[in-house]
Image (spheres, rainbow, N blue to C red):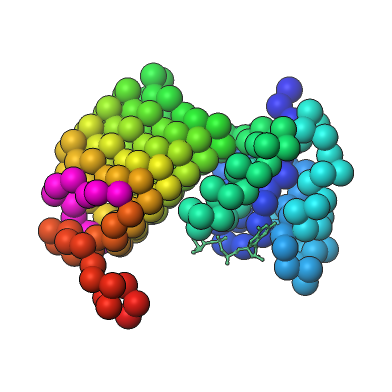
Amino acid sequence: MSAPVIIIGAGGHAKVVVDALRRSGRDILGLVDNDPEKVGATVLGVPVIGGDDAIEKHTPADVNLAIGLGLVRQRQALFSAFKESGYAFAKVIHPAAVVADNARIGEGAQIMAGAIIQPDAIIGDNVIINTRASVDHDCVIGDHVHIAPGATLAGGVWIGEGSMIGVGATLLENVRIGDNCIIAGGATVIGDVPANITVAGVPAKPMTSKEQDA
Ligand code: JB2
């Protein structure tokens, strides 16, 4: 039997993780949150049992973890730190997601309600494919990427580690997005995007630093 899960964070994304885990039949031991005011509260009936230090009361053999936070940088840091301490991360696959049999899904990846993952797609560790996003055949999604609700990736899209694809963005077939990029919500990406760049618009273009600060 699978170990019960502790969810890190007790805000908006955590709710979605609680619901998906519960519907897929996983036991949830509790949530942890850095905000002391949240300790003792509940999220969809699941108790907030403490801060991150409450995790270490349970050995890595006794629990799995799930990250209940949306921000890529925070997710990356938490995943690396707890992996180093020996903890394993649960895959979260909502029963209303459609995942091709031969798609590869990494450790701690979260595939939310209505998401579609087509054949030969590879989803890295600690990735979120959020509500109703679609990832078509032969896409490769790097570790820690967050694909926000309603984003559409055509076949053969490649996304580097730590990138964020905004709500409703569209990526045409075979485009390559480098590591640590941000594709703004609603953007349509028609060509490759080098690493560490933010793009927005239709067709998507790099944002100037002034636009990014606005
Ligand atoms: O390092 C941490 C930590 N950092 C923030 N450890 C733990 N255990 N908890 C942490 N938190 C807590 O996560 C904060 O105190 C807060 O209670 C919670 C974050 O909640 P929030 O709703 O602000 O963000 P979110 O990441 O759950 O949701 C964002 O991302 C989702 C994908 C929002 O933008 C949502 O709208 C979005 N759907």
Residue 86 visible, this orientation: yes
Image quadrant assignment for residue 124? top left
Does residue 188 show up magenta in the picture?
yes
> Is 214 rendered above or below residue 153?
below
- Quarter containing the N terminus: top right
Q: Main secondary structure of the magenta part?
A: loop
**In the picture provided, is 98 more to the left or to the right than 109?**
left
Q: Position of residue 58 (x, y in %)?
A: 84, 39
For the point 50% across and 35% down, which residue is it?
125
Where the C terminus falls, by quadrant?
bottom left
* Of residues 192 and 99, the one drawn nearer to the viewer in this rendering: 192
Can residue 18 be seen from the camera position used here? no
Q: Is residue 213 above or below residue 66?
A: below
Q: Nearer the viewer, residue 113 or 205?
A: 205
Kindly give the residue lying farthest to the right in the view shown: 57
Give the left or right position of residue 129, taking residue 208 as reference: right
Please name the residue shown 72% across and 63% down the image: 34
Q: Nearer the viewer, residue 100 or 189?
A: 189
Where is residue 192? Give x, y as percent: 18, 45
Relative horizontal placement of residue 209, taking residue 190 as reference (left or right): right
In the picture provided, is 169 more to the left or to the right than 127?
A: left
Query: Magenta stretch: residue 173 in it?
Result: no
Which contiguous range is marked in magenta?
186-195
Question: Which residue appears at 45% of the width and 39% of the height?
Answer: 143
Classify residue 89 by image quadrant: top right
Give the residue at x 57% y 62%: 12
| Image coords of residue 102 (percent x, y) | 39, 19
